[in-house]
Amino acid sequence: MLRNKKGDFRGLAAELCVDPVITRIMLNRGIDGSEMKSFLEPDISMLHDPHLLKDANKASQIIAKAVSEGKRLRVIGDYDVDGIFSTFILVSVLRRIGADVSFDIPHRITDGYGMNERLIRKAYEDGVSLIVTCDNGIKSIDEVSLATELGMEVIITDHHELGFDLDASGNKHWNIPEASAVINPHQPDCDYPYKEICGAVVAWKLASVLLEAAGLLDAVMEYLPYAAFATIGDIMPLRDENRVIVYYGLKAMPSIDNPGLLSLINHTGIEGRSLNTYDVGFILGPCFNAAGRLDSALRGVELLLERDAAKASAIAEALRNLNEQRKQMTEEGTKLALEKLEQDNRLLDKVFVVYVPGLHESLAGIVAGRIKERFFRPSFVLTDAREGVKGSGRSIPGYPMSDRLHDVEDLLTRYGGHPMAAGVSMPAENVSDFTARLNDNAGLSEEELTATTYIDLAMPTSYITFGLVEQLARLEPFGEGNERPLFAEKEACFLGARYMGSEKQFLKFSLLGNGRDRLEAVYFGDAAALVETLKQRFGSDEVEKLFAGSKSAVRLTFSYYPQINTFKGRSNLQVRIEDYK
């Protein structure tokens, strides 16, 4: 499907001195003419004033008083990337201003998400006077009350949506914990101009106020890369100040003064080059998440806090190994889930529910996501838990998962989530009814169950130049809310093909280019499936001609993204094929 937002992209291109393709892409992203210049030229001055966050100043004063009185503080974070980096930022800055501060993070399996009674009582027993949460706490009504009863103060920093009750007229009444200070941009009376920031950015904003009050304002930007890392890892929209944070944070990351993060960069093999959102989101970030899934997220915070290079290297290697273990367990779990779906004859269901005994419960969501991507069906993966079964679901547009779970809540002991993802717990004997009722009431048409690829422009590869690719780079960083541009060519003429990769699992094609004999195209998907498709359409003889570099009848419509490939000092244009039909 072609995105086709209307606008004077040629006139805007002339004003900005860019190719019209660039302004068309920005219009497709909902960026109007007044925003385009700042989007192409992000500047630190575009960051919002942290003092605009409700209770930021109040929290700073409470913390300053506790520090001056020598009281013990404890930061309680969360077990994902955002929670780990939020915890690191606050602990680092609190120690920098002289606080006696420790930290804790709930265990994913034994504690579950967020601050809980065990953590509060543990803090009390340890003589803590002030608890500061990060990336959690906005729904901890009872937990804050308990801490208050025990004589402790609580400051909440969070970015999640507030809980609410509806009255008889349908009006929302917000449920906000009675903490000493609550910093969350989603509060209805918070004047912060951009709400879609992650927990680590909220923590960084409070840290900025603390550093300013301590006369250490120059140190604020040292923590920008950590806020950027969490923004990418928590899949926040890369718009407004998030774009600025990530743009400058990525530039600073390779030279950051942090032995732990630098060690992880080295151990994952991406040292010596500029980092991008893929490196953070798919190589580095999963190592921190793996700690929270298979071990303890405390290891992630310890890595970031470690100043000894040798110790940092050892922790980084351990986290990398945990992530490799997580990958292997995920592959095995996905294979088992697919086999179970086939054995149970459920591949024609509109909503997939698969029970995989023995699967590590922290991997259920990842496996559900794999199945959803493969079949484009809402997918739940369930596994054994302490009581009954527990699992996670991943959805598709058109199927609001949280609403559908509300319809079967009588079968569930616990559930929660949002339209695209959810978690569930239930007695094992309810799985069959759960599966049946979700499918009976799926309400999904065949059109809604068909995966759709959206392209920005139908653009022949002959239009690609080095200059255009360099201009496309000005739209980076790519990510949520600013997706990598995607183009398509219809019935492209291939001049040749060959396999590549250690197991010949990928493909490289030669195409007609702009004023050149050949343009490279690479495909990192299922090479065997693509070749089989070509054989079915054009015959084995024509495909053999293609691989021999002879003239053939092979044509293909595909979506792609253009790149500059540099190898041994020589640069050439190539396109990366994303999908085909």
Image (cartoon, grey):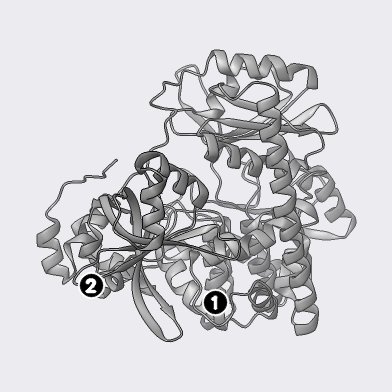
Specify the quadrant of the image occupied by residue 61: bottom right
Residue of label 1: 253
Residue 202 visible in the shown view: no
The outermost residue toward the bottom is: 569
Does residue 300 appear left or right of residue 188 in this picture? right
Query: Circle 1 — which element?
Result: helix
The residue under the point 51% across, 73% down is 275
- Crowd band around label 2 with a 10 angstrom C-alpha radius: few (<14), some (14–19), many (20+): few
Q: Position of residue 580 (x, y in %)?
A: 37, 46
Q: Amino acid at mark 2?
A: Arg
Residue 61 visible in the shown view: yes
Q: Nearer the viewer, residue 350 or 138?
A: 350
Cβ atoms under marks 1 and 2 closer than 8 Å: no
Query: Circle 2 — which element?
Result: loop
Residue of label 2: 516
Q: Amino acid at mark 1?
A: Met
Q: Nearer the viewer, residue 113 or 261?
A: 261
Does residue 22 appear left or right of residue 261 in this picture? left
Quadrant location, the N terminus: top left
398 to 507, vertically: above or below: above
281 to 97, vertically: above or below: above
